[in-house]
Image: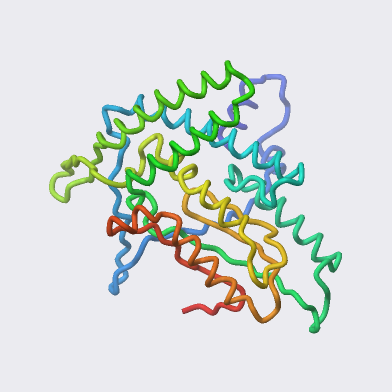
């Protein structure tokens, strides 16, 4: 930055500001960085996350096309849910976060409601606020192909049903489903991933028979879209001791929820909701695998 400013000044011969004056305009900025490590050995050695990378696939262009279509389908799904919430026909709107700004804004809205005392104040208040996060354990490798195909196809079928009154839109939805599902099946069955070899930096390629390879261009869209239908069903269920789920947001495998619960029933509510989220991938459980959530931090939790 300094070199660029000096170079620009020297190019402009009419600029009379000397270097000392220019330096006087600089301001120091303190940057704090949080480093997330996968794990460390007892000896202090840092281990990187073991992944099978998908970005060397010869089908990269196809994967990019599938990812862009799934992203558009997800956006339509989210917009419809938000419209239903605003129209009073659904309790929850968008689930997927697309930027951190959305998350901060919603937290601010919750804080404003707290300041208004909507759920009571003081020690005798009937309700408390439960803040909890979950992390989906090994989400990419745990996504069984049967589950991915089933859930995405159900979303595509719902698009067709929603277009019943518009014949042209319905035909387009039918054709898109036919094309997309065939391409998705092909992409899932022809996943080539690689890992770096220990000796001489050799790359070892593998055919991935299950899961979705990290780094594949459609992987993020698949991970965002696949659980969303069941999530909406879970959120719509009446829950004992829950007054209101103020916020439920997810990005890929990270979930945040803000819930108004009956005081003293926080852990009971948390356990039941965690069980429901763990039940999303029933097909994977039947095949011996699982897509499970791991509670990271809840109200009243202490560090292990």
Extreme residue toward the top, this view: 168
Is 47 or 221 nearer to us in this picture?
221
Image coloring type: rainbow
Residue in the image at 56% along x and 77% along y: 301
The single residue placed furthest to the right in the displayed view is 116
Q: Nearer the viewer, residue 157 or 257?
A: 157
Q: Is residue 173 left or right of residue 200?
A: right
Residue 292 position (above or below residue 26): below
Q: Residue at x 39, y 43 (%)?
A: 148
Outermost residue, bottom direction? Answer: 123
Residue 164, by quadrant, is top right
- Residue at image coords 36%, 37%: 216
Residue 122 position within the rendered picture, expressed as x and y whole percent measured from the top left: 82, 80
Is residue 243 or residue 300 the one in the foreground? 243
Q: Quadrant of the N terminus?
A: top right
Asked if 100 appears above or below 10 in the picture, the reply is below
x and y, in percent, of residue 247 in the image: 66, 56
Residue shown at 63% from the left, 66% from the top? 239
Q: Is residue 224 left or right of residue 267?
A: left
Note whether 87 is above or below 198 in the view shown: above
Instruction: Tell me if 76 is positioned left or right of 89 in this view.
Output: left
Percent coordinates x, y for residue 224 in the rendering: 49, 44
Quadrant in which residue 248 is drawn: bottom right
Residue 110 picture location, percent across and down: 75, 59
Query: Furthest-left residue in view?
Result: 199
């Amino acid at each position: 930055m300094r070199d660029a400013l000096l170079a620009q000044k020297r190019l402009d011969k009419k600029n009379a500001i000397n270097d000392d004056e220019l330096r006087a305009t600089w301001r120091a900025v303190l940057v704090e960085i949080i480093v997330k490590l996968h794990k460390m050995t007892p000896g202090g050695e840092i281990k990187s996350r073991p992944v099978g990378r998908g970005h060397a696939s010869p089908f990269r262009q196809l994967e990019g096309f599938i990812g862009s279509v799934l992203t558009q389908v997800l956006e339509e799904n989210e917009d419809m849910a938000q419209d239903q919430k605003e129209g009073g026909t659904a309790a929850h709107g968008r689930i997927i976060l697309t930027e951190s700004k959305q998350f901060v804004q919603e937290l601010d809205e919750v804080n404003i409601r707290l300041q208004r005392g909507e759920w009571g104040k003081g020690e005798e208040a009937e309700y408390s606020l439960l803040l909890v996060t979950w992390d989906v354990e090994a989400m990419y490798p745990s996504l069984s192909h049967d589950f991915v195909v089933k859930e995405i196809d159900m979303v595509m079928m719902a698009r067709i049903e929603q277009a019943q009154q518009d014949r042209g839109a319905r035909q387009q939805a039918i054709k898109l489903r036919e094309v997309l599902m065939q391409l998705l099946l092909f992409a899932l069955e022809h996943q080539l991933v690689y890992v770096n070899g220990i000796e001489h930096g050799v790359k070892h390629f593998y055919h991935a028979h299950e899961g979705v390879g990290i780094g594949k261009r459609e992987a993020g869209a698949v991970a965002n879209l696949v659980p969303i239908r069941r999530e909406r069903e879970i959120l719509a269920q009446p829950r004992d001791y829950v007054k209101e789920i103020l916020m439920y947001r997810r990005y890929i495998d990270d979930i945040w929820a803000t819930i108004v619960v009956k005081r003293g029933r926080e852990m009971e509510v948390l356990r039941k909701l965690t069980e429901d989220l763990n039940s999303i991938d029933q097909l994977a459980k039947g095949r011996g695998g699982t897509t499970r959530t791991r509670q990271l931090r809840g109200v009243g939790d202490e560090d292990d």
